[in-house]
Amino acid sequence: MNNLSIDKMIKKYLIIGTIIVLGLLNFQTILKWGQNLLGAFSNIIFAILLAYVINLIMSRIEKLFEKVKEKKIYRFKRALSLLASLILLVIIIATFFGLVFPTIFESINMLLASLPKTFNQIQEFLTAIFKNNPEIEKNLKLLELDWKSFLQNIFSFVGGGVANTVDILINLISTLIGSLFNFLLIFVFAIYLLVDKERFIHLYKRLSKLYFPKKIQQRTNLVLLIIHQTFSAFITGQCLEAVILGTLCATGMFLFNMPYPVLVGTLVGVINIIPIVGAYVGGAIGMFLVFTVNPVLSLWFLVYLVILQQFESNFIYPRVVGNSVGLPGIYVLGSVIVFGPLAGIPGMFLGIPFIASIYKLGKIYIQREETQKKQEKVSELNL
């Protein structure tokens, strides 16, 4: 190595070291800038993610339109595919909310109506147990409530509280309007991305050919292809796993003669799209719904769901989602454990395909390095 190469290397490492030191000294400032930058581009990021999810449905519908021989229909295949995808998503979301919310409100009304009867039953049960203890029996008999007045007081308190919080109501409405406006911006931007996606792909290809060597282009394309395959397979696997869990939950509730089997099964399955912990959230709501009909049966539902969730977490989930993304089960569980505390629900959801992409790229890199070393050994032996 000549002196010029050594000087270049020293300068290179000095620059790198200086950048690292300055970065450490100004870590808080850099972090704040990063957060501001991320906040500024958050709507665009959400729009890209939304467009990506819709595109998974749209691209499959487009393939069906490719079989149509009618030229007029084929010409509008993108618009028709996009419209069909949006209609399908709206139907799924509307069906879910239409199924869940009316039943939840009905269950709350049933719970409020059954509170006096349940309280009296508990009081009678405890009185029977402590009938040989006069002091406890006397205290239990004193627990008489005028439920009509009690519920009226609660509703009047809530009503009075709402009437006196006009500012909070205005803030809530303004927040909802702002959120709705943001969602419309995200939605419109996502639609533009989907309608003109070939233009963006063509622009990427032109820029990569213009500024990057062929070797880097190939590697970048390979990385993007693996990330796309992994994320699309993960979303598909997650939906399939949610259907399996929801079906098992509803089937078990049918067999054990529990109320709301279809509703609770749907709820558990849909919320289970949040990896690992989603079923517990859906199960808590399901337990409440069962409790409004039969409090004792809700405990059996909880036992059944815990057993089902353990089976799902340890056997179904790692195999269905792990196999769909090409990731061993232990890595699936590990990514949820690590990314959950770091980034909450988005971390749980995105951590698995992210780790799966790194896992696949790592395997390709190791295989390539091993092949290269074998070829070098063969060349040395030949010499």
Image: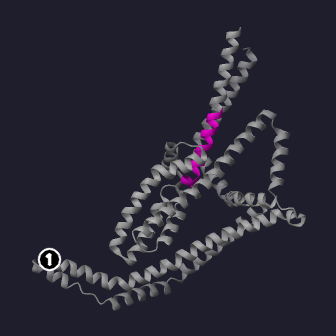
Q: Is 11 one of the magenta-colored residues?
A: no
**Residue 53 placed where, x, y %?**
68, 58
Nearest the eye: 144 or 160: 144
Work out whether residue 275 can be spotted. Answer: yes
Circle 1: element type? loop
> Measuring 46% from the left and 52% from the top, which residue is drawn there?
313
Give, as a three-letter code, the residue at label 1.
Answer: Phe
The residue sitting at the right extreme is: 71
- Could you tell whether 211 is left or right of 6 in the image? right
**Residue 312 placed where, x, y %?**
47, 54
Nearest the eye: 56 or 217: 56
The residue sitting at the top extreme is: 383
Q: Is 354 one of the magenta-colored residues?
A: yes
Q: Identify whether 45 is placed above or below 216.
A: below
> Measuring 75% from the left and 61% from the top, which residue is drawn there?
61
Q: Where is mark 1, residue-wise? A: 130
**Residue 176 placed where, x, y %?**
61, 74
Please state the extent of the stretch shown in magenta in the rendering. Answer: 346-364
**Residue 363 placed where, x, y %?**
62, 34
Q: Quadrant of residue 256?
A: bottom left
